[in-house]
Image (cartoon, rainbow, N blue to C red):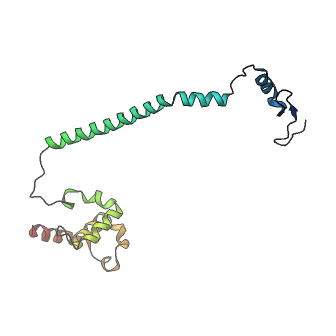
Amino acid sequence: MTKVPYGSATTKECVKCERSISRTSFSKHGKKCKGIKARESRVDIRKRSWVEHRAKRVSEQRSRRATQLFQKLEALRQELREVEHSALPDKSQPKGLRQHPLKKLSQNGPLFEYIFAQMDEIDLLSKAWFRKAYLLLYPDKRHWMPPEFQGEPAESLLQENAKYSEAL
């Protein structure tokens, strides 16, 4: 059996309506012309079902979204209650790097670079202390530092720390 190109199916002339109908769908068309109700195609059934159940679908979507929003709001309210009952932070302690362990902070490269660049504006720690702490934590990464800081010994960190504590 040879394959025929698409759209080249043989047609048959309908006697009643005088239309040329392809032989594959002629039995359905013949029933239609005689007044016999033909079965609905699957496409038509799906379309009708889609239209009929649209309201149900939309209401389910709305209720799901409302539920998710309510859950988010409840979580935020719970966090707010926890924050209200917790003690306020001591105002005498400076904010910033003193609160964070330097090891964790130094693992985030872009954040470490940003803080390193902002050190001129921050009076909390000197650039030298920050650089020496980084070299003390990661001695193998000395070559990443600018050339003028690569030769600095990491032992002077204690001296810088003493200067910092005296400044407070």
- Quadrant for residue 74, please give it: top left
The answer to whether 80 is drawn above or below residue 56 in the figure is: below
Look at the image and tell me in which quarter the N terminus lies: top right
Q: Residue furthest right?
A: 1
Q: How many marks?
A: 0
Measured as percent of width and height from the top left, residue 145 is found at 34, 73
Measured as percent of width and height from the top left, residue 3 is found at 87, 39
Relative to 36, 137 lies left or right:
left
Measured as percent of width and height from the top left, residue 154 is found at 26, 71
The answer to whether 71 is drawn above or below residue 49 in the figure is: below
52 or 120, which lies in front? 52
Q: Residue furthest bottom?
A: 148
Measured as percent of width and height from the top left, residue 65 is found at 39, 36
Query: Residue at coordinates 10% horizontally, 70% vertically from top-left?
Result: 167
Query: Residue at coordinates 79% horizontally, 30% vertically from top-left?
Result: 25
Look at the image and tell me in which quarter the C terminus lies: bottom left
Query: Residue at coordinates 16% horizontally, 68% vertically from top-left?
Result: 161
Q: Residue furthest top?
A: 36
52 or 122, which lies in front? 52
- Quadrant for residue 114, please give it: bottom left
98 or 84, which lies in front? 84
- Quadrant for residue 160, please give it: bottom left
Q: Residue furthest front?
A: 17
